[in-house]
Amino acid sequence: MAFLLLLHEKMRLQRNYNKMKLRSSRLANRKTRIADNITKVQKMYSNKMTQLEQSTKMLQNQFTMGIQNAFGLGTQNQMFNPMNMSGYGITSFVANRMAAILETCPGIPNKDGGYDSIPGGMDSNTYQQMLQAYMSNSLQPQYKKDADGKVDTSNLLGYGPDADHLFTKEQHQVFMQAMSMAQQQQSQAQMMCQQMSSNYQMNISVWLDAQKAQIEAEQDAALAPLEAEQTDIDLEQAGLETQMADAKARLDSLKQACSEGIKESAPTFGLG
């Protein structure tokens, strides 16, 4: 009778042990799926963060290019050619400002505080011709030559590509003064563009930090239930391992007892 009780207890304990082992296996599978889901969530929000940074960088570049183009300092409709190594190219900003300056130019300042008229005039057509000559490096001083063809640098004829196509000294003076003023205004416009771009980058940096914080908060909220379930599984697995270890020890003890009981109940046929 005692042997049967031991055998019954051993079978019951074996069933419980098998159930716990099956539960532990299922928990391990569930934990693997949760880990995969956590990785997917982290990857999704990492991609969001990367896209946010890339779009922010693009916005910064677009803003900078936008204000540069608005001031005539960008690549849009830009007449300056960086491949022109002569050093006589000018930007669209300078060309436009020169045109505006010369359009309102009253003449050449004199010592009396007034203005003298410009010999040869300075209308829009004259300005365009001088501009083309300057950019092609042909707005050069031309001097009178003597009978032997020797240049007399004290006798200036005017400025242009040759003696037959000349602009007056006064036209050249006003043209170059307008260019100097336009270049100064360009420097001021560049500083203004840089300041505006710097302000925008500072403001968008604050906005970017706020957007990143929001994404991180969303990620934490998405991960919280998964991590909580993962913790619950870890705790349950730890408890099962303890119970399984205890059950295994008891099961081994019962197996030993049953084995001894079988030996004791076996007939000896008078040999014992």
Image (cartoon, rainbow, N blue to C red):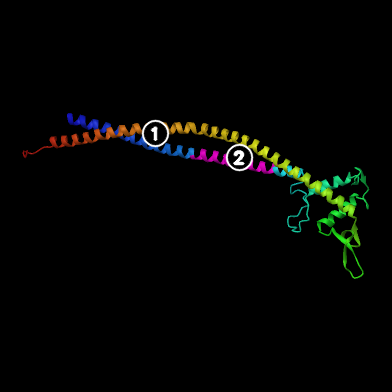
Total count of labels: 2
Residue 78: assigned label: none
Q: Position of residue 264 (x, y in %)?
A: 13, 35
Q: Mark 1 points at which residue?
A: 234
Q: Is residue 175 above or below residue 13?
A: below
Q: Quadrant of the C terminus?
A: top left
Q: Is residue 21 placed above or below 109 in the rendered structure?
A: above
57 part of magenta stretch: yes
> In the rendered image, which quarter is residue 184 located in?
top right
Horizontally, residue 54 falls left or right of residue 78, namely left
Mark 2 surroundings: few (<14), some (14-19) or many (≥20) residues within 10 A: some
Query: In this figure, which residue is indicated by the disc labeled 2?
Result: 52
Give the prevailing secondary structure in the magenta stretch. helix
Residue ID at (52%, 41%): 43
The residue under the point 38% across, 31% down is 235
- Measured from the top left, where is residue 236 in percent x and y? 37, 31
Disc 2, SS: helix
The quadrant where residue 9 appears: top left
Q: How crowded is the residue under tag 1: few (<14 C-alpha within 10 Å), some, or many (20+)?
A: some
Q: What residue type is labelled 2?
A: Leu
- The x and y percentages for residue 265 are 13, 35
Range of residues picked out in magenta: 39-63
Q: In this view, does 93 lie to the left or right of 32?
A: right
Mark 1 belongs to which amino acid? Asp
- For the residue pair 168 and 124, the one nearer the viewer reads as 168
The furthest residue to the left: 270
Q: Residue at x 60, y 39 (%)?
A: 52
In front of the other: 182 or 262: 182
Q: Is residue 81 magenta?
A: no
Residue 171 x, y percent position in the rendering: 89, 52
